[in-house]
Image: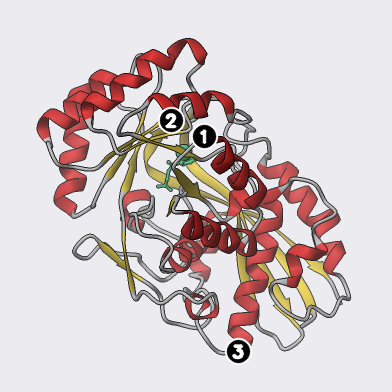
Amino acid sequence: MKLNKAFLYKVHLPLLTPFRTSYGLLREKSFYLIALEDELGNVGYGELEAFPLPDYTEETLEGAKKVVVSLLLEELRGKEIKCAEEVSEFFAWIRGNEMAKSSIESACYDLFAKRQKISLAHFIGAQRKEISVGVSIGIQKNERLLVEKVHAYVSAGYNRVKVKIKPGADFSYLKAIRDEFPELPILADANSAYEEKDLNELLKLDWLNITMIEQPFGVRDLWLHAKLQDKLEKVAVCLDENIRSLEDVKQAHAFGSCRAINLKMARVGGLREALRIAEFCKQTGMIVWCGGMLEAGVGRAYNVALAARNEFQFPGDISATSRYFKQDIVRHNFELVDGKICVPEGLGIGVEIDEQALKRFTESVETILLD
Ligand code: OSB
Ligand code: MG
């Protein structure tokens, strides 16, 4: 396969409700939709997920876009790409920049699946037709509002909830949910908001029968997470921000820093690395589940295909389109039916771009000739 052209659409998609984490508030999902055209005229899509500010991980949307244009697309220019797995090898000399790499690598996977006239799910060996999913809920003003939200999502059929927490909005918020829902699987995600002095406070999560605590400590920390995991009796520590590669997962496993991995394709540099991590987790008995970053339709299609593989036994942060957006840029609406989302069966990622909607939410378009 050879690439002919790339189109980069800068898109701003308003969120139905603002999403508050321990580090900030998001009102819209800003991203680049990347369309890669091959020599046969097929088009593969990728979503560049880096956030406008380097507050989740180090990459920024504009910085990552620059890496895509000046390094990654140049790396592929004029090359004969033999298979999807090869793309990450071409990028290997470039350190970090995982979200930039993932946007292009995944679009190549989409292209290879389309060239073989099969779905992406099939292409990556995913066998499930539908996946069981959960929902991630931002920090609310008070406990009562949070419990109301949980009620609505549980009634809609979500199989578990993840609640964003931070110091001062943690234990009492989680207890309010637990009092109302004695059996509900609850995860707490701190996005790195705690420090060593909070370690004993976090042990109280055991009392509430919380399923997992996600990334309480620093984005480079393995040591404090290991101390916490060792002291917790029931709760699994789950790592998000500090997992960028299989190497990171192996070290976290060896140190005992976690029992679960929130796996995001974009955060680990693409599909190939994500598949290797899923495989390692299965072999070692670590829990692996598919996380999210408020993706629009293209990014969501990748998450759904990945989560359809059988290593993923725990419901992911993959919610219905309607949980995020009034209008998406793809024609496909991901819907929740009996707590499950169907895996698209069309060619490649299996969702088509809604050109009208894309135009409506696009700030600018850039075309890059590659042949
Ligand atoms: O920490 O998992 C996270 C969203 C943006 C950035 C980081 C995270 C999240 C979520 C939302 O938790 C998951 C989703 O529904 O897409
Ligand atoms: Mg997280």
Disc 1 residue type (three-letter): Ser
User: Are the residues tagged 3 and 2 within 8 Å (C-beta)?
Assistant: no
Question: How many C-alpha atoms fall within 10 Å of the one at disc 2: few (<14), some, or many (≥20)?
Answer: many
Quadrant that contains the C terminus = bottom right
Circle 1 crowding by C-alpha within 10 Å: few under 14, some 14–19, many from 20 = many
Q: Nearer the viewer, mark 1 or mark 3?
A: 1
Write down the residue under mark 1: 257
**Residue 68 falls in which quadrant of the image?**
bottom right
Residue annotated with mark 2: 229
Report the residue marked by disc 3.
116
Comes first in the chain, label 1 or label 3: 3
User: On screen, 47 above or below 211?
Assistant: below
The amino acid marked with disc number 3 is: Gln
**Observer-nearest of 283 and 305:** 283
Q: Secondary structure at mark 1?
A: loop
- Sequence-wise, the earlier of marks 3 and 2 is 3
- For the question of whether residue 44 can be seen, the reply is yes
Count of numbered marks: 3
The image position of residue 339, as x and y in percent, is 22, 60
Query: In the rendered structure, which disc, 2 or 1, sits on the residue that comes first in sequence?
Result: 2
Local secondary structure at mark 2: helix
